Image: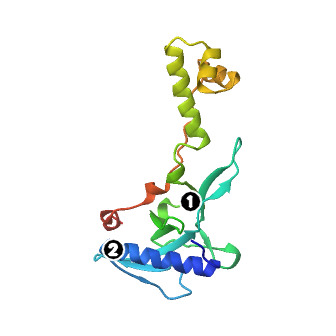
Amino acid sequence: MRVSNELQKGKAGEYLVCADLILKGFVAFISEQGLPYDVVLDTGKRLLKIQVKTSSGTRKVPQRRMDSQMYIFNIKRHGKNNQKRYADGEVDLFALVCLSTRKIGYLTNADMPETINIRADELRGTYYDEKGVRDSVAVLAARERGLNQTQTAKELGLAGSTVNRLCAKDHKPFLTNARYFSDFIREPEWFYGI
C-alpha cells in the first residue's frame, strides 16, 4: 500500500481507527483540526480522546549485531518539527496504526513512552535475541544427547565459539521485554476499563 505523503498517511490512519472502533461497537468520529487528539471515542460511559500515530510499515533499527525490522512510533511529541509535548489530560489513548497490515494497537497515555519500537508479528522468531534462545535450547539438547561441542556445532550449523559460549556454566540466554504489535490489539472490553 502506497500513501503519497505524510498528511495522507495520517488521514488514512485516522479513518482506519474510526472504522476499527465502530466495528467494535462504539461511536467514534474524527475530531476538528488543530486539537491535540485525532479521534473521539464514545464508550457509552465517557468520551475518550485518541491520538493516532501511523506507520507505513517496519523500518530498519540498528542493533549491535544486526539490524532489526520494527515499527517505530514517535509518541509524546507533536506539532511542527515535533517541538511540542502532549500535556496531561490532552490525550487518553494512543492508537498505533500500521498501514501495510492495517492493524491497530492501543495504549493508554500513562503507558506510553516517548518513542516505541514494536516487533512485527510476521517476523516472530527471527530477531537476534530469539535466535539466541533457540540456539541455547538446541545446544543443551545436543549436549544431553552426548554430542561434544564440535559435533554440536556441526549438527546445528553454528560456529564452534558460539557453541562454546552457550555451553558455559554461567551462560543465560538474553531475554528481552520486546513486544509484538499483536500485544497492543484490544478487544472492546478493554476500552470500558479506561
Image height of 160 relative to 114, above or below: above
Crowding near pointer 1: few (<14 within 10 Å), some, many (20+)? few
- According to the picture, the residue beneath numbered tag 1 turns out to be 113
Image height of 180 relative to 83, above or below: above
Q: Which residue is drawn at 61% across and 23% down?
A: 166
- According to the picture, the residue beneath numbered tag 2 turns out to be 23
Q: At which x and y percent is residue 115?
A: 61, 61
Q: Residue at x 59, y 17 (%)?
A: 169
Image height of 35 relative to 13, above or below: below
**Element class at badge 1:** loop
In the displayed structure image, the side of residue 20 where residue 6 appears, left or right = right
Q: At which x and y percent is residue 70?
A: 60, 55
Q: Which of marks 1 and 2 is in front?
A: 2
Q: At which x and y percent is residue 9?
A: 58, 76
In the displayed structure image, the side of residue 62 where residue 170 appears, left or right = left
Nearest to the observer: residue 171 or residue 56: 56
Nearest to the observer: residue 52 or residue 131: 131
Q: What's the residue type where badge 1 is placed?
A: Pro
Q: Is residue 83 visible?
A: no
* The quadrant where residue 194 appears: bottom left
Lower sequence index among marks 1 and 2: 2
Tell me the distance, in whole angstroms, between the alpha carbons under discs 1 and 2: 28 Å
* The quadrant where residue 20 appears: bottom left
Q: At which x and y percent is residue 29?
A: 41, 83
